[in-house]
Image (cartoon, rainbow, N blue to C red):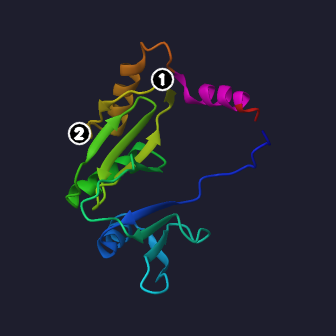
Amino acid sequence: MPELPKFELSHIGLWVTDMDRMREFYTRLLGFKVMDQGQLPNGGLRLTFLSKNPKDHHQIVLVTGRKEGTPSTINQITFRVASIKEVRAMHDLVVANQVQGVDPVDHGNAWSVYFMDPEGNRVEFFCDTPWYVAQPRREVLDFSLSDQEIEETTRKRIASDPTTRPFGEWRDAKRLEFGL
């Protein structure tokens, strides 16, 4: 088998039923900017290209054509943030905007908040914890605690798991595995 070229994830495309509602959610609530939009010839599909970075023409493309009532086939659309402070801010934002399906989760190796976009696609915002611990793990993330209390609660919860170690050590082992 030939060697694969180096590549990275660029963007995600979502089939939508209501372009205006989805564009409004991703721009108003999540801060994406419309980079481009248009319709294919002869009354074809409408497309809206969204990005949070001007170097990328789009990070999300919304495309009409999803049949009304069709369930999402996306498990999750995930965004990394720098710290628990930002995960908490996103949690507070979606709660304040009465977004459906808000689900704060402590994975041991990450703190996350999940929620649904208007068409039932699950969105996740997360940050890494300082530790690696084998997955899957799922505990309720309690935002009534301070950031320091959340970190201490997670540390205590995973301390007895034999797979727990500093995330840096786990990453170093993976770099060797990848030959990097």
User: Is residue 170 a member of the stretch shown in magenta?
Assistant: yes
Q: How many marks?
A: 2
Q: Distance between the residues labelled 1 and 2?
A: 26 Å
The one nearer the camera, 111 or 48, is 48
The one nearer the camera, 151 or 22, is 22
In which quadrant of the rendered image does the N terminus lie? top right
In the shown orientation, is residue 75 left or right of residue 130?
Answer: left
Which residues are the magenta region? 165-177
In the shown orientation, is residue 128 left or right of residue 3?
Answer: left
In which quadrant of the rendered image does the C terminus lie? top right
User: Is residue 54 a member of the stretch shown in magenta?
Assistant: no
Q: Which residue type carries mark 1?
A: Ala
Measured as percent of width and height from the top left, residue 174 is found at: 65, 29
Measured as percent of width and height from the top left, residue 75 is found at: 39, 46
Q: Which label is found at residue 86?
A: none
Residue 96 appears in which quarter of the rendering?
Answer: bottom left
Q: Which residue type carries mark 2?
A: Ser
The main secondary structure of the magenta stretch is: helix
Q: Name the residue: 26% across, 65% down.
A: 68
Residue receiving disc 2: 144
Q: Name the residue: 44% across, 80% down.
A: 44
Residue receiving disc 1: 134
